Amino acid sequence: MSIRPIDAMAIPLKSAHFLIFLLLVSNIFTPIISLGSTIDQEREEFYEELLLRPLPDRKVLAHFHFQSTAPSSNSNGRHHHLFPKAISQLVQKFQIKEMELSFTQGRWNYELWGGFDPISSSNAKPPGVELWAVFDVPQDQVDATWKNLTHTLSGLFCASINFLESSTMYSAPQWSFRPATGNIRYGMLPREAVCTENLTPWLKLLPCRDKDGLSALMDRPSIYKSFYHSQRLHLTSNKSGPEGMNPGIILEQTLTVVLQPNSQRTSVTYSGEKNVQPSWSLSSIFGRKVSGRCVLAKSSNVYLQLERGLVAELKKNKNNGVGNIASEGFWSGTGFELSVRPDKVFEEENSSHRRGSSVLFEFSIDKYSDSQPFDLGLKWKFPVTWSSEPAPLHASRFLMGSGNERGAIAILLKSADLNDASLGTCSSSNGYKFRVDVFQVVPWYVKVYYHTLQLFVNGQPKAVGDVIETIHVSPSKDKISPGVMEMVLQFPCDVKSAALTLEFDKGFLHIDEYPPDANQGFDIPSAAISFPNFYTSLLFPGNCSVDKSPMLSKFQEKNPVLSYTEVLLVPLTTPDFSMPYNVITITCTVFALYFGSLLNVLRRRVDEEERLLKSKAGKTTPLSGLLSKLSAKLRGRPQETPQSPSNSSSLISSKLLLKVFLVAVLAVAWQYYFG
Amino acid sequence: MEKKEENKRQRKKIRGGFWRWVIASVIFRLILIYFPQNLNLSSRPEVSTPLTSLRRLAEGYWLKQASMSPYAGSMYHGSPLLLSVLGPLTVKRIEGQPDHVLCSLLFVIADIMSAMLLRATGWKLQVAYRESLKALDIINIVESSDILASGDIAALVYLWNPFTIVACVGLSTSPIENLFIILMLYGACIRLVPLAAFGWVMATHLSLYPAILIIPVILLMGYGLDAPPRKLFLLKGYCKIGDNNSGNIHCEQEEMINRSKAQIIFSRRPVVLFFFWTTLWSVYVLVLCGISVKQYSGLWEMFQRTYGFILTVEDMSPNIGVLWYFFAEVFDFFRNFFLIVFHVNILFMILPLAIRLNHRPCFLAFVYIAISSMLKSYPSVGDSALYLGLLVLFLDELADMPFSFFIFCGYVGISLLSPVMHNLWIWRGTGNANFYFATAIAYACLQIILLVESVSAMLNHDRKLRKLSVANLQDGKS
């Protein structure tokens, strides 16, 4: 009975203690918490952006760009707020300096969709999987690290990236692929099928997944029915940031999709005009709307870009373009109509291109919500035709020759009417020369004869030394390493076309080395062709928000124009897969025939045979061999006649027994010692 | 006298004919060389194997010029010496001439030299054969084939063999390999020890398999040229002694025994000299190779890429042998086992043959060459050309070989069928690998029959001689 009051007393006492404790704790930790929040503000960040761009062939390009940054790992321990832990562990474990992994389906159409802008040269990727990584480990551990990395990535992304582990699948480009990097490994899997199982783990790296924000637009069916989609993951880590860059890991995830909008015909149809641009909206191309931003994102913007060609065309249509395009009335006045009023309009600063400058509309989706979703729509008022800016030379690659014994690879570079501006850079920068870097990896079963390299400039054969400035070849080793060819070509500025041919023999593989569908052929991965004299950069005027936008700052970087060629399909001869046993037995029979018959000829003694025959002819006993021997013995010792048969048989049987015994002993000994 | 005159005239006539045919063969080759694209012979799998292809050599030379090891990559597997001799020729172009005209000319010269050496060897062999028959008093069987100079015929057969022509025109290095093998045999026949040693070292260096020819060369050095079994001479000697016993001339008897023994005694001096020269030449060749591959990675890589490539049958592109398909199909687990079995198959036969045919070292060399060209990992028609040329050297001995017409027809048939099957499989895609492999199997069987029958014919010939000489002796006694 007396316990209760004590209990009742104890409770307020405890609570008082707790309060004091709380006070104390809060007093101690408030400065720390506030400090942490300031660090967080400048460090772990996430941006999401989406760029939309109408393409000349009635398609729409959608380019998602997600960027997460994390401070260098040791500053805030093992834990992250936004940054995916798997990636930071990857970077720590394999000492990755830079890495890029891309999954691509379809082929970027350089002629129609452009080859000169940042998206086409850094986001258009070869079909299948491409992976390259730069490591910060000693030279002798690079290969081992690469192998571990491929396994980890294949687990992370549910893809067969682990096939890149084999030394026949990856190469170490020296300078042509990415300049000034050592310890780089590069591998491609052209036949890798890309599907949702690769996209889902990629989306898991985003803080909002695909539940909220821009990534909610990624409707699987609409993405996978696109003409081209490339999902890319770029990783940069600076340990100590010597070049003024803030240390830490930058993870850049992009998804580039080329979609065909459902052609909702505009009410005004122009007769005979096939190139009427379809009007589209976000909901019509993705089937979804953006219902607000991802709350974790620092900024969440949608951009609509009009290409230089399109802007010039629109200007022309607007009756000699009155005033500034970026002025207020433009977006509703000329040729098309936007359903949402842009927050900002930027015009490209760089006006060295005669084609004009591209225009960018920025839409911030901070203000949109579930009840009022963001659905950007674009409606064309009258047909416009324009062309995207192509790469200085359009690169294509094809196979020559027929049959399954040999062939030739040809790389054709065709000039796509170089505009004056690019010509100007060509002549001024490098003494009337025009530089092209070629990087090509060839699997070992395509045995390239590098001495057969032939060059044709404008249709005329040229000596190799005149055009090739530097060449680095590491020839393929059978079943060990692929052939790598890196070249720097110097063309005169007025080059119209250039072709490069290399002959090869097709290899013959072991029966186990063929894939399940051997008759489909083997893929030669794309060659990368870059134009170091030409840079892709889209400079929009120095707006403070532009500085903040990682995508636009990425566009501002001066990167050389890069384009990939087609993947080649080489049919290889197949052996008969069904009859290894027949081949083995028949060949062994031939060998046995050789051995037996030759030995027989060597040991045959004709005279003795004759004698034997004679002796046989004398005696008509049918028993051969043994009996004749016996009879000879008998003739030698006739007194033993009655006993001899049993005797000899017993002798033989005893011999036989002895032999059997010997073999048994041997077997037992073998079993005992080695079994 | 008149008969002899006539003989001489006839011989002169034949000799004139011989030179005419030689010149005709050279002209024929030149015509073929000037055909556009070399008739695509250089890409035929029957002609150019990974070891002998001049295209691969050019690639090796290009790599070397680009200051890389010629063995980087898996293209070139030949000798570095060949590379430094032939390499510059592959690059040099003469206006208005075919691409590889200089190399082709070199191969034509090699062919002609091989033919001349064959001819000289044939003469030597024939003279030795006749002398030995004379010593055994069985001249009569030679009388009929007196006019047939097997050396001339062998040279002409070698020159006009379609296989030789194809190998020469088809830009493979096998004419040069063959030249060194024939050079070795010739050197051993005339007992010019340094030449024989040089030939052996070079031939082994170029294609490894001639290494087993050291046994016939030693026998040639030790016992001299091909002769009937030595027992016969001994028998003859003793019988003669037996005859002379009645005459009671002691010293003549001694002389007889010595003379007959001289042919049996193994003379060690040339053999020792041969070994001396062999080491000298191999050191020389290795030093030269070492110099030419020094800046890359040295001799070990060279051995790995040449001999290692030959022994491990890495390249599975089709050729006229059987091993490529076998190793393309056999399970990896058994690969090493079968590699050993197949190579040992060549080695296994060395000893029995050497025991049985030790009195005929040249023929033994032919048998070894035939075996190795049949069982080697990358056979080509150039190898067949060599042993077919050598076969004709033993025209007298092998006159009554059975199945010769069948074998001839087989060779013709296979050399027509094999390109057809290859075309069906590789170019048209209507056939499959088994078609081509079947011709390879048939070719191997044909070679086996040729080999076995020729060995058997040679042994039978020896038996015949033995019978004849025994009969002679018995006649003499009675």
Image (cartoon, coloured by chain):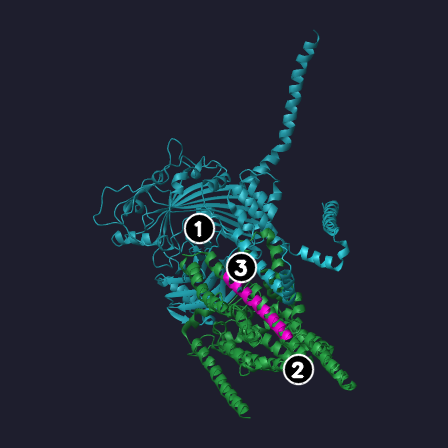
Chain colours: A cyan, B green
Q: Which residue is mark 3?
A: B324
Disc 1 is placed on an element classified as loop
Q: Which residue is mark 1?
A: A127
Q: Nearer the viewer, residue B476 or B378?
A: B476
The three-letter code of the residue at mark 2 reads Ala
Q: Is residue A534 visible?
A: no
Where does the image place residue B80, in percent across and percent down from the top left? 59, 71
Label 1 environment density (alpha carbons within 10 Å; few <14, some 14–19, many ≥20) = many
Per the model, the C-alpha gap separating discs 2 and 1 is 83 Å
Q: Nearer the viewer, residue B338 or B239?
A: B239
Q: Which residue is mark 2?
A: B135
Span shown in magenta: B441-467
Chain letter behind tag 2: B
Quadrant showing the C terminus of chain B: bottom right
Horizontal side, residue A436 vs residue B73: left or right: left
The three-letter code of the residue at mark 3 reads Trp
Q: Are marks 2 and 1 on the same chain?
A: no
